[in-house]
Image: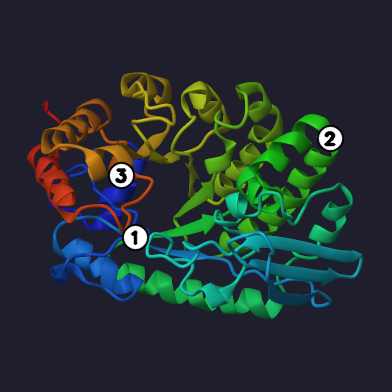
């Protein structure tokens, strides 16, 4: 087969057409590359991976701007009896204030979490780090009356911001074409946004104890998500990835998932398909009871599927393949924290062989560690992974 560009290879794979070989991509989060692969920006990162035969893509995401009448104040307070200072951020809206209080723990600025380049940056609105560090203090949305205030933060982008984003997306699309890689759009939504705003415990308790308020919260997030998707669809993005980390069965029963999230995700997926684009959904663990629901929703791609689930059990990849039946492609199949960080060379190779043998034939698999390679991921483990992948990646898959 004639060698394909990275973009051609990924599109063929995600559309269940057999590529020249099974793609491999690394989602990097805090990862420090070795000297021969150093990069300082996304373009250099893509070039580095492509130089050793590994696939990559470029991505865009929308900016966020609050209602013009929102005023933001931020400060730090000493906390007597507590080891850490308290970061406070208050959003003054026309219908009342919203307030976040987060402890600045010793690990707030760390190589493991590159989004915090400096402790001075303080609290971000959407941040996994906020959730455990706000316990016993204050989340942004804690009561039903906070939802009306939230609308002023999840506010429609002004036309000038939309125009700037379209220019940026056009530039990144041109760069993607020149590099021969896919253009991907990222979109936070659903329970991920709810968890950042309410905390995981607060989110689940609101769903159980105040179901009408929780539905209202999800609908406010959903309307914001739809507006954002309409803007993103007016760009050359080819694959959209929606977050669903906090929507798995670690937090929700399948029935609650079907009631709370599936109809809204279905609506977004239909929007994407009406524009002839691919829709992806990111959920790494808690997926097994939801596989049939995913098929009904109509996703094209399940992003960052982890073969080792949250309870330490191995996912039945054969069942995943049978259930998806060439309707949903997979980006994932490898585990980072257990296999790549702690596993033996043989365990790493076996996980690569199993993923390609079970999920790879006929297309539909982009091999990728879930959820990302991190600051603590050993380069030696990545080298073993790449070596094993090269042994069995060629299509058609004949056995591993």
Which of disc 2 and disc 1 is earlier in sequence?
Answer: 1
Q: Nearer the viewer, residue 105 or 166?
A: 105
Looking at the image, residue 385 sits to the left or right of residue 27; the answer is: left
The residue that mark 2 highlights is 210
Q: Which residue is mark 3?
A: 369
Looking at the image, is mark 3 or mark 2 nearer the viewer?
A: 2
Residue occupying the point 22% across, 72% down: 38
Nearest the viewer among 102 and 127 is 102
Q: Which residue in the structure is indicated by mark 1?
A: 57
Q: CA distance from mark 3 to mark 2?
A: 38 Å
> Could you say which is closer to the camera, residue 120 or residue 294?
120
Q: Give the residue drawn at x 68%, y 65%.
A: 79
CA neighbours of label 1 inside 10 A, class few (<14), some (14 to 19), many (20+): many
Kindly state the secondary structure of the residue where label 3 is placed.
strand
User: Could you tell me residue 221's position as x and y percent?
Assistant: 72, 51
Image spot of residue 374 (x, y percent): 33, 55
**107 shown above or below 286:** below
Compared to residue 343, the image places residue 125 above or below, namely below
Q: CA distance from mark 1 to mark 2?
A: 41 Å
Upstream in sequence: badge 3 or badge 2: 2
Note whether residue 1 is visible.
Answer: no
* Quarter of the image with the C terminus in it: top left
Q: Secondary structure at mark 2?
A: loop
Secondary structure beneath label 1: strand
- Residue 49 position, x and y percent, is 21, 62
Residue occupying image coordinates x 15% and y 71%: 35
Q: Is residue 334 left or right of residue 386?
A: right
Find residue 187 and report its horizontal and vertical position in percent. 56, 55
Mark 2: give few (<14), some (14-19) or many (20+) Cα within 10 Å.
some
- Number of marks in the rendered image: 3
Of badges 1 and 3, the one in the foreground is 3
Q: How many residues crowd mark 3 within 10 Å: few (<14), some (14–19), many (20+)?
A: many
């Amino acid at each position: 087969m004639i060698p394909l560009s990275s973009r051609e290879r990924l599109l063929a794979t995600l559309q269940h057409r057999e590529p020249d070989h099974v793609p491999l991509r690394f989602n990097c989060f805090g990862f420090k590359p070795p000297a021969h692969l150093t990069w300082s920006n996304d373009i250099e990162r893509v070039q580095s991976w492509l130089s050793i035969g590994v696939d990559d893509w470029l991505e865009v995401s929308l900016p966020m701007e609050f209602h013009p009448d929102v005023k933001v104040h931020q400060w730090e307070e000493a906390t007597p009896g507590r080891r850490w200072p308290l970061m406070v951020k208050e959003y003054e809206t026309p219908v009342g204030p919203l307030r976040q209080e987060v402890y600045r723990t010793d690990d707030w600025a760390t190589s493991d979490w590159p989004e915090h380049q400096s402790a001075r940056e303080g609290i971000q609105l959407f941040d996994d780090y906020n959730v455990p560090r706000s316990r016993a203090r204050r989340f942004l949305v804690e009561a039903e009356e906070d939802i009306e205030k939230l609308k002023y933060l999840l506010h429609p982008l002004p036309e000038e911001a939309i125009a700037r984003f379209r220019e940026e997306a056009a530039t990144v699309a041109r760069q993607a074409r020149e590099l021969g890689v896919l253009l991907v759009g990222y979109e936070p939504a659903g329970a991920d946004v709810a968890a950042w705003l309410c905390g995981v415990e607060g989110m689940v308790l609101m769903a159980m104890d105040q179901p009408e308020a929780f539905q209202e919260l999800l609908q406010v997030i959903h309307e914001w998500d739809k507006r954002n998707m309409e803007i993103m669809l007016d760009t050359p993005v080819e694959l959209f990835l929606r977050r669903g980390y906090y929507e798995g069965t670690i937090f929700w029963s399948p029935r609650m998932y079907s009631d709370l999230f599936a109809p809204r995700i279905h609506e977004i997926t239909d929007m994407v398909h009406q524009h002839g684009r691919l829709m992806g959904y990111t959920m790494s663990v808690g997926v097994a009871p939801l596989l049939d629901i995913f098929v009904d929703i109509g996703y094209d791609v399940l992003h960052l599927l982890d073969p080792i689930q949250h309870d330490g059990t191995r996912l039945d990849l054969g069942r995943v393949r049978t259930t998806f039946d060439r309707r949903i492609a997979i980006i994932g199949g490898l585990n980072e924290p257990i296999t790549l960080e702690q596993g033996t060379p043989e365990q790493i190779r076996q996980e690569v062989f199993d993923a390609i043998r079970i999920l790879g034939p006929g297309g539909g698999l982009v091999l990728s560690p879930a959820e990302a390679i991190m600051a603590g991921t050993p380069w030696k483990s990545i080298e073993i992974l790449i070596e094993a992948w090269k042994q069995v990646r060629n299509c058609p898959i004949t056995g591993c």
